[in-house]
Image: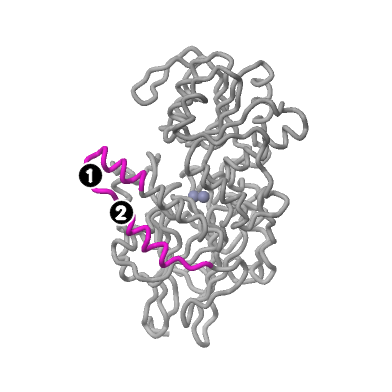
Amino acid sequence: MGTKESFYVDMSTSCSNVTGSAHLENVRFPNATNTKFLVDCGLHQGKEECSFIHGKTADDLNQMLFFNPEGISFTLVTHNHVDHTGRLPLLTKRGFKGNIYMTEDTRVLLPLALNDSQKVLRDVAKRNNKKPLYIDTDVENVLRKAQACKMEETKQIDDHIRVTYFNNGHLIGAAIILVQISYPEKEDINLLFLGDYNYKNIFLDLAELPQWVKDLRLIVVTESTYGYMDSSEINNCFEENILSCLHDGGTVVAPVFSLGRAQEILYVLKELQTLKELDRSIPVYLDGKLCFNYTSLFTSGKLNIKPSMIDFLPDNLTFVDKTTRDKVLHGKEQKIILTTSGMGNYGPAQLYIPEYIRRPGSMIHFTGYTAPDTLGGRLKNTPLGGTVQVGGLVVEKNCLVEYTNQFSAHAKADELIRFLKEFKRLELVLVTHGEEKSKEMLANRIVKEVKPKAVGIFDSRYLFRVNAYGLVKTMSTKYL
Ligand SMILES: [Zn+2]
Ligand SMILES: [Zn+2]
């Protein structure tokens, strides 16, 4: 068989460790034509510890697309987190002409996320005297190309490629994406992208992945955010911690992510009120404009939330804006404040944390991952009575600062392994989207416990050539 007749996909990614998810698939057909498509196109964020990227900031990495957008036929989006969607406007700005496919709920949520990301990038660029990565018309162009797909309904994208979106508990609207590539008289090449994955979500009724998918000959791309940790290691302490602080008369400030986490914490507070463990007379405040907009969408009926969860807001809840913030910030009465951003270094959290951290008896309770270079991360290493810098301010840490990973939206290593074991014919599993240690630990466990035909660590250093029967070869890339 000559090379002309070969039928394969070259799979590559810009993902270094956790952020900046963008996968390029280059399909080579036996008639020597090519189709290129993308899965996600996200922003690099913050400082990432990464042994193979030298001296490049997130900003540098964001400017670099490792492909020509004009040559891309279409883009598939797994979910509405900016590390997966935040560079879509850069694609349209640089000449991408195709459709962008996503679930119905992601289609509803995406405008909020991209408009916010555009404003954040604009402000950062202004501060650094630089041009922004993209502007509002680039965002509008993305939204014009956005096509909604129904869950579990197969869409024929072109003559050879069909795509199906399946439920994923990571986030409302999140999906697992199956891409099936066919050619006459050849066996299909099946690629399954888990995106960021979780098997559960309190707001969603999640149908199991159908058996016909589990029976396919598959190449799977899996995340590994918690590849180093089992679900038994989760620290379920949030309710106990905040109730103990409130019982002693203190105020709780909980930094939250605006989509998913904020709404889940609101539900937890409502549950505590129902159980009479939390007194309804203690006011609950939610501050953060994007967070307010997402919360309004959750209650609007425009999203596929399970009916029993539409009514998730606690009693005595007030949304805070610029005009009412001062009273909440400086008032002496006891309260619970939920505020963005989740790691404490953007949004109104930058005001609430320095105000309440110096008040003995109050508590700052982080509700998710805090990167080491963020305020949440730095507070971890600040002893009680020590000082910390917030913006230009130096403040004394007099209150308790607590952390929990109980609300994580990512499956843990044992849960990923359990899920992967359900597949009957795994030809290749590619491990991506995690710290280097996480990727390695999960990949090693998959080799031993899942036993697919091949396992690879997938980051910007390697390209994997695959056909219907799995791995053909790996190559080093020149990118970065
Ligand atoms: Zn995500
Ligand atoms: Zn992600």
Q: Position of residue 415 (x, y in %)?
A: 65, 49
Q: Specify the farthest residue to the front.
A: 323
Question: Mark 2: which secondary structure?
Answer: loop
Q: CA distance from mark 1 to mark 2?
A: 12 Å
Q: Position of residue 159 (x, y in %)?
A: 47, 83
Task: Name the residue that disc number 1 marks.
Answer: 130
Q: Residue at x 62, y 69 (%)?
A: 152
- The image shows residue 332, relative to residue 197, as above or below, that is above
Q: Which residues are magenta?
A: 119-148
Q: Residue at x 44, y 33 (%)?
A: 322
Q: Residue at x 38, y 47 (%)?
A: 44
- The quadrant in which the N terminus is found is bottom left
Q: Is residue 276 above or below residue 222?
A: above
Residue at mark 2: C-beta within 8 A of ligand 2? no
Tell me the amino acid under the disc marked 1. Lys
| Viewer-closest of 477 and 72 | 72
Q: Amino acid at mark 2?
A: Tyr
Q: In terms of image quadrants, where is residue 125? A: top left
Q: Is residue 421 left or right of residue 45?
A: right
Residue 456 located within the stretch drawn in magenta: no
- Secondary structure category for the residue under label 1: loop
Total labels: the figure holds 2
Query: Is 28 above or below relative to 239?
Result: below
Q: Could you tell me what secondary structure mostly forms the magenta stretch? A: helix
Residue identified by numbered label 2? 134
Q: Is residue 125 magenta?
A: yes
Position of residue 12 in the picture relative to residue 214 (left or right): left
Instruction: Examine the rendering and report whether any part of residue 454 can be seen.
Output: no
The residue under the point 68% across, 57% down is 206
* Mark 1 neighbour density, 10 Å: few (under 14) some (14–19) many (20 or more): few
Tell me where residue 367 appears, x and y as whole percent. Answer: 57, 34
The answer to whether any part of residue 94 appears in the image is yes
